[in-house]
Image (cartoon, rainbow, N blue to C red):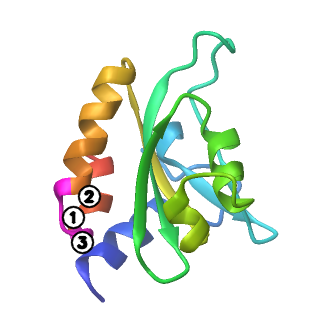
Amino acid sequence: MDLAQAILDAFLFDADEPAPGASLHRWISYHHGAPLFHSAMTTTSNNRQWCLYLIECRDGSFYAGITNDLDARYKAHVEGRGARYTRAHPPIRLIGAKAYENRSAASRAEWEIKQLPKQKKIAYLHL
């Protein structure tokens, strides 16, 4: 098992509740084959918290992006209305997300994660 898979396994759960010690914005469960993102980022529509998210694509590649509405953005990727990259490399699951104070901080984090090799990207979300 490689490092990326070990980290991925540590943060993906099939339970109805997050694992002890797991923060809600990092917990992803799968129900009926569709990812459900459980988030502590529920705020009013015009004051949503920005986050960096990481998607695994069908070809095994990762896609990183930022948003202030993770559910809608992930749905757009799945439906082929997201980024050009995910139209060509369809997503299979949302790996995780990390909240940031504002769009600027999330954009900096997006740039940083895109500079990392694949095996370090999942760990970056959980720092």
Is 81 placed above or below 103 here? below
Q: Which residues are magenta?
A: 115-119
Which residue appears farthest toward the front when viewing the image?
84
Disc 2 is placed on an element classified as: helix
Q: Position of residue 12 (x, y in %)?
A: 51, 64
Q: Which mark is residue 119?
A: 3
Examine the structure image and report whether residue 69 is included in the region drawn in magenta: no
Mark 3 to mark 2: distance in Å? 8 Å
Q: Position of residue 20 (x, y in %)?
A: 48, 48
Q: What residue is pinned by disc 2?
A: 123
Q: What residue is pinned by disc 1?
A: 120
Mark 2 to mark 1: distance in Å? 5 Å
Amino acid type at image mark 2: Ala
Q: Position of residue 80 (x, y in %)?
A: 69, 61
Residues under numbered marks 3 and 1 in contact, where contact means CB atoms less than 8 Å apart: yes
Q: Which mark is residue 25?
A: none
The quarter in which the C terminus is drawn is: top left
Which residue appears farthest toward the bottom when viewing the image?
1
- Could you say which is closer to the camera, residue 25 or residue 15? 25
Chief secondary structure of the magenta span? helix
Residues under numbered marks 2 and 1 in contact, where contact means CB atoms less than 8 Å apart: yes
Residues under numbered marks 3 and 2 in contact, where contact means CB atoms less than 8 Å apart: no
- The residue depicted at 41 percent of the width and 75 percent of the height is 61
Amino acid type at image mark 1: Lys
- Could you say which is closer to the camera, residue 51 or residue 7? 51
